[in-house]
Amino acid sequence: METEGFVKKEFEDHADVYVINTCSVTENADKECRQLVRRIQRRAPESLVVITGCYAQLKPKEIAAIEGVDLVLGAAEKFNIAEHLKELSKGDSTKICSCDIEDVEGFQSSFSLTDRTRTFLKVQDGCDYTCSFCTIPLARGHSRSDSIEGVLQNVDELAAAGAKEIVLTGINLGDFGKGTNGGKKREESFFELVQALDEHNGIERYRISSIEPNLLSNEIIEFVAQSRHFMPHFHIPLQSGSNEVLGKMRRRYRRELYAERVAAIKALMPHCCIGVDVIVGFPGETEELFRETFEFLHELEVSYFHVFTYSERANTLAVDMPDAVPMHVRHERNKILRNLSYQKMQYFTEQHHGQQRKVLFESPSNGMLEGYTDNYIKVKTPHREAWQHAIVDWTLA
C-alpha cells in the first residue's frame, strides 16, 4: 500500500482507510473484529473499513453484514488490497472478494519491519494436516513455500534495512519445501533452508518460531547446537500431554516422541529455551487426563507455555465430539498451567544467574531498554543510546 502512495498511521489516529487483519484460531476473533469496527465507526464514520485474514476467508458473508464494513478480502485477494481500494467509495454496498480455499495457489512472502531490530519473515503458508480442532487449513489452504533463493533475497533486503534478528514463521514451518502452488512434491527442505541461512552473511541471529515435534529432526537439533547464527531456542507445539487426547486431536505424534525431542535438545544445549503450545479443555479431557498433561509438563525440561483454552470452531471434527468440558473448568485448567509456566520460566532464568550471554536490545520504552538473550531470557535496563539495536555481552543477575 505504501508503494501506492498510502501513508501508515497509528490505529488511534484518524485515517482514510482502516484494515483489520483477523484470526480464526479462537472464538474471540469475531467479537474483537466487531468491537474494532464499532470503534472506527464512532471515530471516523466516513473512513473505509477493510476486513481480511482467516476469519474473512471462513465467514465473509457474516463479516459483510457488520455495519460499517466496506470490503471483505479472502486469502487470495488480500495482497491486491490497493487495487480494490481504487474502486471503492464509502456508502457502496459491502464488496466481498473471496474464493474457495482450494483455489488459493502461489506463495506470497512477507515480513515485518518497523522500528524493531527483530523482524518476522514468512517462508511457508498453509497446512496439509487435519487436526480435529483446527480451522487453519480451511482458511489458509494447502501447504506451500517460498524457495530458498527467495528467502535469501528477503534476508538481504532486511539486512540492508538494519535488521539484526529474523524469526522464521509459517503456518507449518517444518513443512517448508513444498512448491509455491501447493504441490505435494517436496522441492527443498526446512533443514536445507536452515543450512543456507546459517552460511548466508548479513543477519546475526535467527530463530525458529514454531515447529511440529514430528518435523523437528535430530539433524536440525544437531545443526542448531553448533550453528553460527541460529539461537538456542525452540517453540514446539504439544497441545496435550495425554496420548488419548492427542489421538482425538489427530496429532501426528505421541508424548513419548515429544519427550525424546526435548531430551535431545537438552543433551546438546542444556541452556536452550523451549516453549510449548498446549490446549486445555478439549472434548473428553477428564480430570485424570488433564492431570496427565500437568504431570508430563511438570517433569519435562521446558521453559514456558502458551496455554490456549479450547473453543468450538465450526466445520471441525472436534465440534461434534461428545463429553464437552464445562467452560469454567476449561478456564480453571488454563490458569493452573499458566501458573506452572510462570514457575518454569522463573526456574529457567535462575539457572542462568551469573552467566554472560549476548542480548539484542530493541527500541526504548519509558526510558528503559528491553531485549532478549540468545536463549530468550528477557532483560530490562535503563536506556543507553549505544546499546539500542545492538548486541551486548550481558551478565545475568
Image (cartoon, helix red, strand yellow):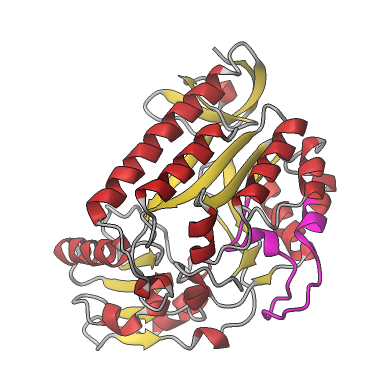
Furthest residue in direction right, as rendered = 199
The answer to whether 277 is drawn above or below residue 47 in the figure is above
> x and y percent of residue 270 in the render?
70, 27
Was residue 85 drawn as part of the magenta stretch in this picture? no
> x and y percent of residue 271 in the render?
67, 27
The answer to whether 97 is drawn above or below residue 227 in the figure is below
Furthest residue in direction front, as rendered = 288
Image point 85% across, 46% down: which residue? Answer: 199
Residues drawn in magenta: 168-194
The answer to which of 58 and 116 lies nearer the viewer is: 58
Q: Report how many numbered discs are placed on residues in the image.
A: 0
Was residue 170 drawn as part of the magenta stretch in this picture? yes
* Side (left or right) of 87 relative to 172: left
> x and y percent of residue 125 in the render?
60, 68
Q: Main secondary structure of the magenta part?
A: loop
Image point 36% across, 61% down: which residue? Answer: 26
Query: Where, quadrant-wise, is the C terminus in this rendering?
Result: top right
Image point 51% across, 83% down: which residue? Answer: 101
Q: Is residue 121 visible?
A: yes
Q: Is residue 204 visible?
A: no
- Please tell me in which quadrant of the rendered image residue 48 appears: bottom left
The answer to whether 371 is drawn above or below residue 324 in the figure is above
Image point 35% across, 38% down: which residue? Answer: 336
> x and y percent of residue 85 in the render?
39, 79
* Side (left or right) of 29 relative to 251: left
* Side (left or right) of 191 relative to 27: right
The answer to whether 104 is drawn above or below residue 324 in the figure is below
